[in-house]
């Protein structure tokens, strides 16, 4: 009888766990794709609640996190944590950002998006409670400095989005810290300009890149310039102009290069005054007429 009860109990737990996982994926999808803002917010709140509940009841096996859809899950192996971020959209095309850090033992550290209140935070050192919200799409561990470079998207402003490079470290107390003075913008013997994170602003109508280039070991992003439409004078916002900004290593810093050298493409114009050589076959190998 006892064995039967235990078997039934474990079957119940399995069904419950499967049901929770389905619910998580359902609400993750709804908070992104539902047409109504009210329903998107409801789905996000329910998703956040279910996510924490399932982590707390599955602390010994967190692999279910890696199969969830609609959010970013980055395994930061050097810190033995998962960095999980997600977002939902407002009617004005801006985004709300959410995140948690989950340790191997199931301990959760919530991230509170303060980017609207902070404004520009290029020189700020921030805690999880004052996080510069982002949906992180890539993380790179820097073995030279023992920190993670985080590449993400912030959509706090519906008229102007941002790609950013942030830095995640763990201090002596074991606390997570966002931002670090490593981005050398301008060298000066008296007072160099060093930022704690990089923000690249661009128009929602355009697409930009912001990444680490493995071959050159450089941080690279599009350069964006403010553009005004020709006909109606409407400001289109910041648009990529085809050039790139780079950051190269200089000791423990990343030194800014304002404009990377692009490979020039020579424009070849046809010479309409040159007589066609009919002695040669065409591109299909056929003999030309008159030969």
Image: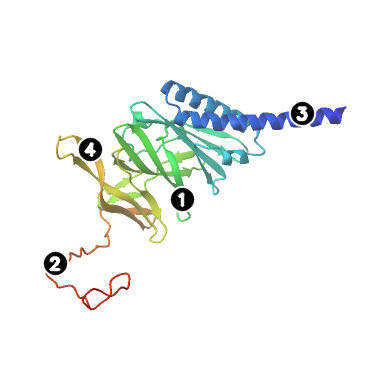
Residue under label 3 = 9
Q: Nearer the viewer, residue 129 or 283?
A: 283
- Name which of mark 2 and mark 4 comes first in the sequence: 4
Q: What element carries label 2?
A: loop
Question: Disc 2 vs disc 3: Cβ atoms closer than 8 Å?
Answer: no
Its colouring scheme is: rainbow
Position of 180 with respect to 141 (left or right) is: left
Task: Give the residue at mark 2.
Answer: 272
Q: Is residue 3 left or right of residue 49?
A: right
Corner quadrant of residue 7: top right
Identify the residue under disc 1: 140
Q: Where is residue 124 in the image (x, y as percent from the top left)?
A: 36, 38
Relative to residue 77, is residue 110 depicted above or below?
Answer: above
Closer to us: mark 2 or mark 3?
2
Q: Residue 236 carries which label?
A: 4
The residues bearing labels 1 and 3 have C-alpha atoms spaced at a distance of 42 Å
Is residue 50 something one can see in this rendering?
Answer: yes
In three-dimensional space, the C-alpha distance between marks 2 and 3, rounded to whole angstroms, equals 84 Å
Residue 115: % across, % down: 37, 32
Please identify, in this view, whether the residue under mark 2 or under mark 1 is nearer the observer.
2
Q: Earlier in the sequence, mark 1 or mark 3?
A: 3
Q: What element carries label 4?
A: strand
Marks 2 and 3, the one that precedes in the sequence: 3
- Report the quarter where the N terminus lies: top right
């Amino acid at each position: 009888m006892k064995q039967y009860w235990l078997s039934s109990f474990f079957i119940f737990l399995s069904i419950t766990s499967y049901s929770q996982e389905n619910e998580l994926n359902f609400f993750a999808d709804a908070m992104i794709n539902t047409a109504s803002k009210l329903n998107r917010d409801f789905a996000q709140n329910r998703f956040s609640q279910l996510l924490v509940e399932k982590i707390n009841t599955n602390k010994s096996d967190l692999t279910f996190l890696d199969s969830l859809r609609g959010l970013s899950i980055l395994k930061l192996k050097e810190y033995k944590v998962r960095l999980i971020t997600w977002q939902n959209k407002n009617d004005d095309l801006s985004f709300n950002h959410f995140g948690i850090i989950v340790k191997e033992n199931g301990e959760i550290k919530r991230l509170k998006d303060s980017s609207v209140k902070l404004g520009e935070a290029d020189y700020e050192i921030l805690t999880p409670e004052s996080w510069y919200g982002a949906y992180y799409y890539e993380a790179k561990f820097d073995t030279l400095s023992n920190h993670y470079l985080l590449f993400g998207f912030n959509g706090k402003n519906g008229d102007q989005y941002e790609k950013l490079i942030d830095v995640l470290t763990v201090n002596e107390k074991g606390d997570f810290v966002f931002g670090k003075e490593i981005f050398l913008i301008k060298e000066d013997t008296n007072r160099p300009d060093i930022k704690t994170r990089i923000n690249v602003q661009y128009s929602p109508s355009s697409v930009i890149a912001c990444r680490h280039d493995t071959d050159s070991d450089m941080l690279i992003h599009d350069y964006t310039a403010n553009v005004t439409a020709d006909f109606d004078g409407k400001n289109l916002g910041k648009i990529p102009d085809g050039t790139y900004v780079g950051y190269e290593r200089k000791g423990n810093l990343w030194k800014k290069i304002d404009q990377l050298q692009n490979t020039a493409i020579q424009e070849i114009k046809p010479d309409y005054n040159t007589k066609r050589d009919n002695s040669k076959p065409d591109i299909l190998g056929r003999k030309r007429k008159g030969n």
